Image (cartoon, rainbow, N blue to C red):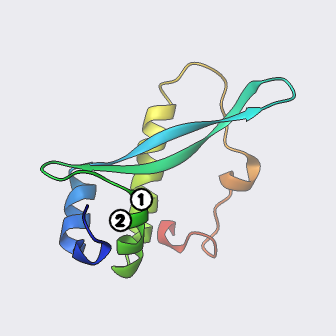
Amino acid sequence: MIDTNAISRELLLDALAREAITPAFQCLVDFRDYGVKGFEVLARWVEPGIGEIPPVRFIPAMEQHGLMDALLIHMLSKACQIAVTWEGDFALPSIYRHFSCEILPCLA
């Protein structure tokens, strides 16, 4: 298994550029009516020649190299591109529709 300290900034940037880090969706279910109320988006990375690199390894490396903003933008963009193709009536909760520069300065 790859060590967090062995993950370079260049490897992370390359993985983002190649879209090797992808969103995985986990349903959020309301157990009162068993309806799907939304999705949690999780980052997953499969690297050729290495295999799956768990978030517990690459997220700290992203933080260490100052790339969390790049990961957030990448994941948000990809997740929205995928979700827009789904059937159904989905919406972002109002708290997430109004990103401010204080909450997400990378989007300003």
In this view, the residue farthest toward the front is 1
In this view, the residue farthest toward the top is 87
Vertically, is 61 above or below 50?
below
Residue 90 got which mark? none
What amino acid does circle 2 point to?
A: Phe
Vertically, is 87 above or below 95?
above
Where disc 2 sits, the SS reads: helix
| Quadrant location of the N terminus in the rendered image | bottom left
Where disc 1 sits, the SS reads: helix
Q: Which residue is mark 2?
A: 58
Alpha-carbon span between mark 2 and mark 1: 5 Å
Q: Which residue is mark 1?
A: 55
Instruction: Give the percent coordinates (x, y) of residue 16.
Output: 28, 57
Instruction: Give the percent coordinates (x, y) of residue 7.
Output: 24, 71
**Residue found 18% across the figure and 71% down from its top:** 10
Vertically, is 24 above or below 44?
above
